[in-house]
Amino acid sequence: MRAHRDLLEKSDPDVFATLTGEENRQRLGVELIPSENYTYPEVLAVLGSVFTNKYSEGYPGRRYYGGQEFTDRVEILARERACQVFRSEHANVQPLSGSPMNQAVYLGLLELGDTILAMDLSHGGHLTHGAPVSHMGRLFNFVRYKTGATDGAIDFDAVRELAREHKPKLVLCGYTSYPRDLDYAAFKAVADEVGAYTMCDASHYAGLVAGGVMKNPMDHGFDVMTTTSHKSLRGPRGGMILCRKELAARIDKSVFPGLQGGPHMNVIAGIAITMGKALTPEFRDYAAQVLLNTQAFAGALTSGGAQLVTGGTDNHMLVMNTQASFGLDGRVAEELLDEVGITTNKQIIPDDPNPPLRPSGIRIGTPAATTRGMKEREMERLAGWMLAVLGKPEDAALRADIRREVEAMCLTFPVPGL
Ligand code: DSN
């Protein structure tokens, strides 16, 4: 690695400067975007390895190019380990990322124009769960369920009514901005009643499922679970589709040749490593600490007067209503926190009256900070700094002081791989 860096520094100092700049940003700031993490040094090693040189269209034992002895072996390792981690009968580890992963499921199991019942986007659903600006919103007919106004609970009588009325072919749960666990048995009962497939997009919290601290949709008879590999799982940027074996051929065909060409074998090697790590006791400890950290964060923020969507959290994230808490929209809050080295992201909240680029809230997540070894005490310090910054948006001197404190704390928690 050292030799590769030296070569880059000499041959392309402009790109090298962006790399070292980003390394410093990561080292000196706290990453609280709930979908981000610091991957394992071993994963960094295979991402920058000769696996990136290889075309491997097809699947192990059925490729369209020669020279597949080692790519076959590593893809089989990734698939077998993923099945073990999530107690699934089949795994496809080729999706290039989260959006094509979900698209491959819809296109593999449904006909164009079919109805999908999914979570309302402002209540936490993802773009690929039917946003009108996503191609999926044009190709399929999405009907949306919402979450309860105070505690965020899902009203399954209302979900069942929607299902009876619209007869979806797929009932989809999972989310990108919702701080609670899900009742998979209740979703499955609704889907069974109308003869629909069940699918969970667990991209955000799959690491907590793997670590045994959140429920696993595959334990509740779900047909399909999708997850990206780089969020709470700490892997490379990629996607996985887990499914029952009866659906395996349709899913595989939909990913390749239906939607994609050559898989990224360096990423698949990284997924194999990530799944191996997810099977260890250390990973269970990590997942448990992520939950302890979000709970400590939530407690400190609410006792300081902040308003959290649903009132708290069962997972790795918090959604703060910055408008109601501090009279600041999410964009301003994000920018103020950026100034002190605390990275969050602006976020729409349920039925947000404001537009997505100036929404009413921010998301806060603990997977990355937990990877650095931060615990409840650091979460409380971070919450205190956030309350101070957002409570006094006009105070630039305060932000300069807090930035120094954030940097000092960060230097005592090294980023893995740096
Ligand atoms: N961009 C991801 C997130 O931040 O939730 C989802 O794709």
Image (cartoon, rainbow, N blue to C red):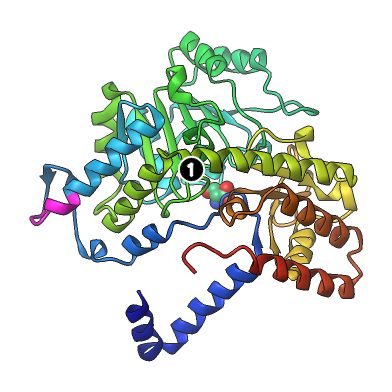
Q: Which of the 4 quarters of the picture holds residue 45? A: bottom left
Outermost residue to the bottom: 10
Is residue 67 found inside the magenta-colored segment of the image?
yes
Query: For this rendering, which residue is in front, 140 or 269?
Result: 269
User: Can residue 213 be seen in this snapshot?
Assistant: yes
x, y percent for residue 268: 30, 51
Query: For this rendering, which residue is in front, 145 or 140?
Result: 145
x, y percent for residue 321: 80, 45
Q: Which of the 4 quarters of the picture holds residue 87? A: top left
User: Can residue 107 be seen in this snapshot?
Assistant: no
Identified by mark 1, the residue type is Glu
Number of marks in picture = 1
Per the image, the residue denoted by label 1 is 282
Magenta range is 65-71
Identity of the residue drawn at 51% across and 37% down:
284
Q: Is residue 98 left or right of residue 54?
A: right
Is residue 154 found inside the magenta-colored segment of the image?
no
x, y percent for residue 97: 41, 50
